[in-house]
Image: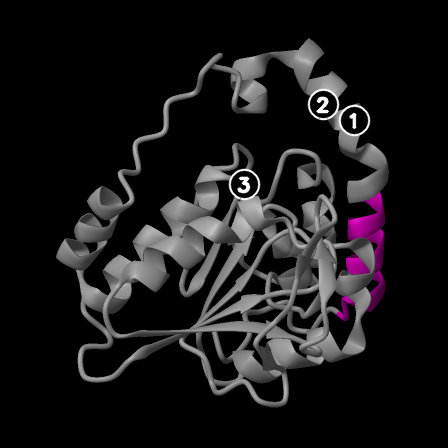
Amino acid sequence: MNEIADRPIKVGVLIEPGVLLMDVVGVQSVLGFSSGVELYHVGKTKELIRAWGDLPLAATTTYAECPLLDVLVAGAMAPQVYSDPQTIAFVQEQAKHDPYFIGICAGALLFGAAGLLQGRRATTNFQCIDRLAEFGCDVVEGGSVVEDGKLFTAGPATGGFEAALLVLSHLRGEHAAKLQELNVEYHPKAVFGVGTAELAGPELAEEVKAFGKGFFSLCVDEAVSKYQPRPDSGRSAAM
């Protein structure tokens, strides 16, 4: 498949408080290195924010300025972002024009809040996975990329690279995706072999769950507070 061959691909990466760069840098790298891509770092404002780890960062494009996108990317962000009316409205407005959505880690929760997971297959990080069904979706555990139409969700870190490569293969063909896989030399090898809850085993998995429980519970609570199920429980017409 080669959906877009005659015009630039417009890719928007959400830049909001607490954004976890680990989740979005893979998508930004794979698609940003590709020829014929317009990359937008999108936020409510262009004012300086603090990414995760207190890193200063700023969007370059506001929601109001952002064009219709071919790809919209969300990674984990601060809890209040998932219930922010402007952010949710921006996602829903973009959804009307049928872009690809890439939700990495807790970024999938934002798409849940916007009603885009309902009736679809989706995943997230294992610290949120037990509550993902609250958005009306068919939950897939394991953190690997889950593709449902133009919705791509995955766990953190490597998930961003993998989802981006798959989306690129749809937009520009498999060869273009292979070029970028080699260009960024993507060949992850887990140092200790415990990079998934299944590989780590229950004891270590529970320890890590407890480590992030407070933060991720807040994220889910905020997103669920804005989720409004559709009566038909079907898919969005745009997706």
Confirm whether residue 122 shows in the render: no
Q: Which corner quadrant of the image does residue 11 belong to?
A: bottom left
From the viewer's perspective, tell me whether residue 183 is left or right of residue 232: left
From the viewer's perspective, tell me whether residue 193 is left or right of residue 59: left
Q: Which corner quadrant of the image does residue 89 belong to?
A: bottom right
Q: Residue drawn 30% across and 60% down?
A: 33
Q: Residues within 10 Å of mark 3 (few under 14, many from 20)?
A: many
Q: Is residue 151 above or below residue 213?
A: below
For numbered disc 3, what is the local secondary structure?
loop
User: Which residues are the magenta region?
Assistant: 217-228
Q: Which corner quadrant of the image does residue 128 belong to?
A: top right
Q: Please give the residue where the numbered disc 3 appears in the rendered image.
A: 155
Q: Please give the residue where the numbered disc 2 appears in the rendered image.
A: 208
* Count of numbered marks: 3
**Residue 132 appears at what percent x and percent y?**
68, 47
From the viewer's perspective, tell me whether residue 190 is left or right of residue 92: left
Q: Residue drawn 72% across and 74% down?
A: 47
**Residue 178 appears at what percent x and percent y?**
18, 49
Counting residues from the start of the chain, the first of labels 3 and 2 encountered is: 3
Confirm whether residue 27 shows in the render: yes
The residue type indicated by label 1 comes to Phe
Q: Mark 2–mark 1 contact, CB under 8 Å?
A: yes
Q: Residue drawn 45% across and 16% down?
A: 191
Spatial CA span between label 3 and label 1: 17 Å
Say if the magenta span includes residue 220. Answer: yes
The residue type indicated by label 3 comes to Gly
Say if the magenta span includes residue 216. Answer: no
Between 55 and 141, the one nearer to me in the picture? 55
For numbered disc 2, what is the local secondary structure?
helix
Q: Please give the residue where the numbered disc 1 appears in the rendered image.
A: 211
